[in-house]
Amino acid sequence: MALIALVGCGGRDQPDDQRLHQDIVNGTSGAEVTFDATVLTEPAESGGHERFEVKDPAGDMLEIDHNTSLAPSAPIHASDQIVIHGQLYIDPGPHYGVHCTHAATSSGCPYPGWLEFAGNYYE
């Protein structure tokens, strides 16, 4: 019943891997995305962010910038499967990434985000 209530009240966004891929193809920087990913690199702390590379099911490679001053670090390692909810950015190159993976919003992050790993949310 609790699951039905959570889903009925909106709950969390479900992964839409194809939408992420289309946003990348279309160059939709700033899109709010939720997708499945495989962690490719060990997370590294840099400037208050946990940074790591992931690959989505379509084969797109993205950098994840998880702000550890606003959200707890996720205990992930290379080859782990995770779900990511945040904001897509596209830098020149092109270089794809996702940031705003924290519940606290700011002027640059209008929507709350999160990382889900092993049934736990890091937001």
Image (cartoon, rainbow, N blue to C red):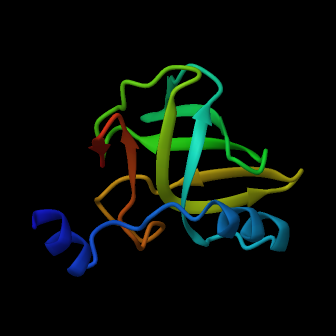
Q: Position of residue 17 (x, y in %)?
A: 63, 60
Q: Residue furthest front?
A: 1
Q: Residue furthest right?
A: 93
Report the number of discs.
Answer: 0
Q: Nearer the viewer, residue 17 or 123?
A: 17
Q: Which residue sits at x=44%, y=64%?
A: 14
Residue 88, horizontal then vertical, whole percent: 62, 61
Q: Quadrant of residue 122?
A: top left
* Residue visible at 64% across and 37% down in the picture: 54
Q: Residue furthest left?
A: 1
Residue 31 figure quarter: bottom right
Q: Is residue 2 above or below residue 26?
A: above
Could you tell whether 19 is left or right of 83 in the image?
A: right
Residue drawn at the location 36% of the way across and 31% of the way down: 74
In the depicted structure, whether residue 87 falls above or below residue 47: below
Q: 98 and 48: which one is in front?
A: 98
Image position of 51 (left or right of 110): right
* Residue at 66 percent of width and 50 percent of height: 97
- Indicate left or right for 100 with 123 as reference: right
Where is residue 33? Give x, y as percent: 55, 65
Q: Which quadrant of the rendered structure holds the N terminus?
A: bottom left
Can you say whether 122 is above or below 47 in the image? Answer: below
On screen, residue 7 above or below 84 = below
Residue 69: x and y in percent read 32, 40
Q: Which of the 4 image quarters holds residue 112?
A: bottom left
